[in-house]
Image: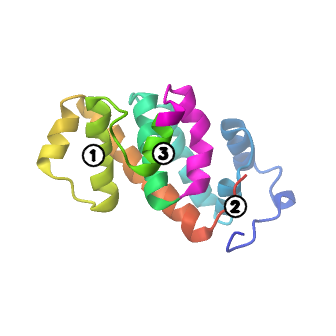
Amino acid sequence: MARLPYPDPGGFETDPLVHRIQTERGKLLNLYSMLMHSPALAEGWLSFFTAIRQKCSLPGRIRELVIMRIASIHGASYEFSAHKPFALAEGITLDQIESLRNGSVSAFNDTERSVLAYCEHMTNEVAVPQEIFDSVKAHFNDQQMVELTATIAAYNLVSRFLEAMQIDHD
């Protein structure tokens, strides 16, 4: 059960921001409902995560690999469940999803293993050794490196917010 009550949806059902959230996400997810306690924050969150998920050049498979791994590291079951369909749509197999859950990298290619090492360091230690950065950089251009780094940072935020607020699964 969430640590704060979700705002009454009747209080903002005609809000243009809620309409935008519903249009972009399909419905007002519990995460966004909770964020509506602060409409300015909800709006910024929506814009930022729409850019990450829909406007970046980073391959969707790479994006979903790191999202699923971060959710696993943090025990963020809401995020893991929410992104499983996206991961499958990006060609990540059920066996690979299970590998992401338990931290095994043997099911992935060299590029994906370097990305997962980068993700692990950013998530667990914050600082990334130069050799880990260089191994990832060998596979991505500068724009994609910025997008990968921002995606990892952003989804650490998501997992931490979901878990701290104990957001209920949709």
Q: Amino acid at mark 2?
A: Asp
Left or right relative to 136: residue 14: right
The magenta region covers: 76-95
Question: Is residue 23 one of those drawn in magenta?
Answer: no
Residue 68 visible in the displayed image? yes
Separation (CA) of disc 1 from disc 2: 30 Å
Left or right relative to 122: residue 65: right
**x, y percent for residue 34:** 68, 62
Nearer the camera: disc 1 or disc 2: 1
| The image quarter in which residue 85 lies | top right
Residue to which mark 2 is pinned: 168
Please, is residue 75 above or below residue 95 in the view?
Answer: below
Q: Secondary structure at mark 3?
A: helix
Counting residues from the N terminus, which is met first, the one under dot 3 or under dot 2?
3
Separation (CA) of disc 3 from disc 1: 14 Å
Q: Secondary structure at mark 1?
A: helix
Examine the residues drawn in magenta and state their main secondary structure.
helix
Q: Amino acid at mark 1?
A: Ala
Please, is residue 70 above or below residue 160 in the view?
Answer: above
Viewer-side residue, 71 vs 148: 71
Question: Is residue 84 one of those drawn in magenta?
Answer: yes
Q: Are marks 3 and 2 in contact (CB under 8 Å)?
A: no
**x, y percent for residue 45:** 55, 52
Q: Amino acid at mark 3?
A: Met
Residue to which mark 1 is pinned: 117
Q: Residue at x 60, y 59 (%)?
A: 40
Counting residues from the N terminus, which is met first, the one under dot 1 or under dot 2?
1
Q: Are marks 3 and 1 in contact (CB under 8 Å)?
A: no
- Residue lying furthest right: 10
Residue to which mark 3 is pinned: 68
